[in-house]
Image (spheres, rainbow, N blue to C red):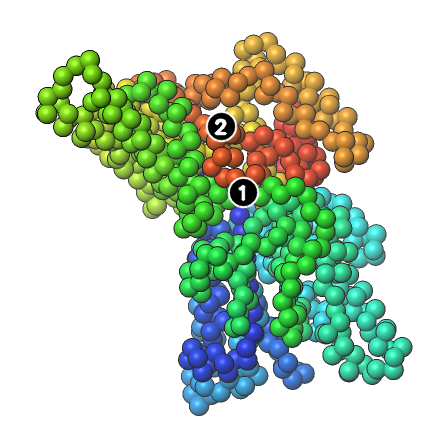
Amino acid sequence: MSDAIKHECGIALVRLLKPLEYYQKKYGTSFYGINKMYLMMEKQHNRGQDGAGFASIKLDVNPGTRYISRVRSNQQAPIQDIFAQINERLNGILEKNPDKKNDVQWQLEHMPYVGNLFLGHVRYGTFGKNSIESVHPFLRQNNWKHKNLIVAGNFNMTNSNDLLDELIELGMHPKENTDTVTVMEKIGHFLDDEVANIYQQCKEKGINKKDASLVIEEELDIKKVLQRASKNWDGGYAMVGLLGHGDAFVYRDPAGIRPAYYYQDDEVVVVASERPAIQTVFNVDYTDVHELEHAHALIIKKNGNVSVQQVQEQLPKKSCSFERIYFSRGSDAEIYEERKNLGKNVFPKILQSIHNDVDGTVFSFIPNTAETSFYGMVQAADDYLIQHKLSTILDGKRNLSAEKVTQILSERARMEKIAIKDAKLRTFIADDNSRDDLVAHVYDVTYGVVKPSDNLVIIDDSIVRGTTLKKSIIKILDRLNPKKIVVVSSAPQIRYPDCYGIDMAKLEEFIAFKATLELLKETDQYHIIDDIYKKCKNQDSVADDKLENYVREMYKPFSPEQISNKIAQLLKTEDINAEVNVIFQSIEGLHQACPKNEGDWYFTGKYPTPGGVKVVNRAFINFYEGNNKRAY
């Protein structure tokens, strides 16, 4: 999207099901798991650029041997930095011990990162913090192997303050008030409790303490731990946990908001946030990679047994549609087709805006992530032209020469690469007085392909704040002197905050919200804002199942087209000569294009959990009272 927002984290897990000697013999290296993790993380680099982390666990090493390794980075290229550190350590040890290059058992005992179980994480920080302490995986340490817990995930809890209070009631003193820490401590508490219960049963049976550890490994019920820990969680999450002795789990939220996919064969179990990462790295077919069911956990026991178990009751599935529109890589077969369909579905509105003048229109896209939707839009334009050609040629009212028929048949939608982002300018920081001028130069344009009589249609993934459009994109497009600029969003109008992982927290930042406020003022209906505020304030003591999103009421007086027209007015400054039109995808068009991901709360205000409703009402109260802070 042209407006930069921080968004989704990514997870990766690899569990080797064979002894390390197997991979050394078959693939020529005992670093097989490490190498695969590097590729898995790089293939999900699009999901995290603030930081990255890696953790590994060795199974069945002798007491006194370090069996957990972890490395994290918040450098500019965090994935490369992590694996540069790992390679430097491993190569340094092997250079001093060249005779141990193929001695897998020695490597297990003396080298970090070599192991059987691996976890990777790429991070987008939704709270603007980029300290190394905020980078996953998080580690909860203990001298009992079973109580060591490593957690990483793609998630946000809407009720982290309530979860913190629950920990305090349990007698804890958490070191931070973040959802990652509270979630990890909640899991850790019930993990400790489960371990203690099994140990007590062993004691009653006369099993000594040393042998009790082996019993705990076998009988530890991960599902039970997760059930107790997540009882009151409200949010979207795809969460990975590793236990020090070798158990692992991946747990997905009851509404399936955040994505998780897995693959298993006789050599490995693999998990990732995106299907193509697994397909590419392990060269497996689309049908071999499975989506983890919502409210379920993939549980991998130390002995290699793998199961998918339901942990909580399922809510109606509302997987995030932004995953399909923008966040996930478009190399997924389904996502690629869905993004094309987004472009196709919005084309009728485009055709209306350009008065059916396809021949007099140049079609393009911005930024590069909108390219697939652009293909769908152009395909719809070509389909329209085919029908137009047929009707013209088959019209019996006039005789057409061969030359005229040839001219008609040669008509094509005019596609051009109009805007190119200058990556060198992205990270430059200037003072506020000069920033706007610099922003206006982030994109370069292709001159000479647009005529003054042309319409210029530019498709974007979505329009959030409209800041880049107003300060940069529309200005530079206007330099090409088109008759009309049509900005198209393949997504519907973003009207409400997200609270499940995407960094869209403040209502007043959304261009659709601003436009609706203006319309309310112009039509003498601004009293609706006062009424909504009172209703939001009165919900503090309302039961969760009775909560309502009253913010939806502000949009009811107006059609989506009225709001789109007002957005166009807000985006067009006095120095723009071309007519400016803004078109958004319809909700119906979104669901037709992305039928499996029906999560649309940022467009419709229909939140899948009570916590989402609380957040949107709190966000409105913050706006009304002038509190410039996040609603979660």
Q: Find residue 59 and report its horizontal and vertical position in percent.
A: 62, 77
Number of callouts in the render? 2
Question: In this orientation, which residue lies closer to the viewer: 587 or 88?
Answer: 587
Task: Tell me: residue 90, above or below residue 482.
Answer: below
For discs 1 and 2, the disc positioned in front in the rendered view: 1
Q: Residue furthest bottom?
A: 99
Can you see residue 622?
no
Task: Tell me: residue 87, above or below residue 451.
Answer: below
User: Quarter holding the C terminus?
Assistant: top right
Give, as a three-letter code, the residue at label 1: Lys
Q: Residue 373 carries which label?
A: none
Q: Provide the residue designation for mark 1.
A: 596
Q: Residue at x 53, y 48 (%)?
A: 8
Q: In this view, does 123 lie to the left or right of 369?
A: right
Q: In which quarter of the image is residue 55?
A: bottom right
User: Quarter holding the N terminus?
Assistant: top left
Q: Provide the residue designation for mark 2.
A: 586
Q: Is residue 183 left or right of residue 256?
A: right
Q: Which residue is drawn at 15% across and 25% down?
A: 405
The 10 Å Cα crowd at callout 1, few under 14, some 14 to 19, many 20 or more, is some
Q: Is residue 303 left or right of residue 171?
A: left
The 10 Å Cα crowd at callout 2, few under 14, some 14 to 19, many 20 or more, is many
Q: Find residue 339 and report its horizontal and vertical position in percent.
A: 42, 40
Q: In this view, does 187 lie to the left or right of 89?
A: right
Give, as a three-letter code, the residue at label 2: Ser
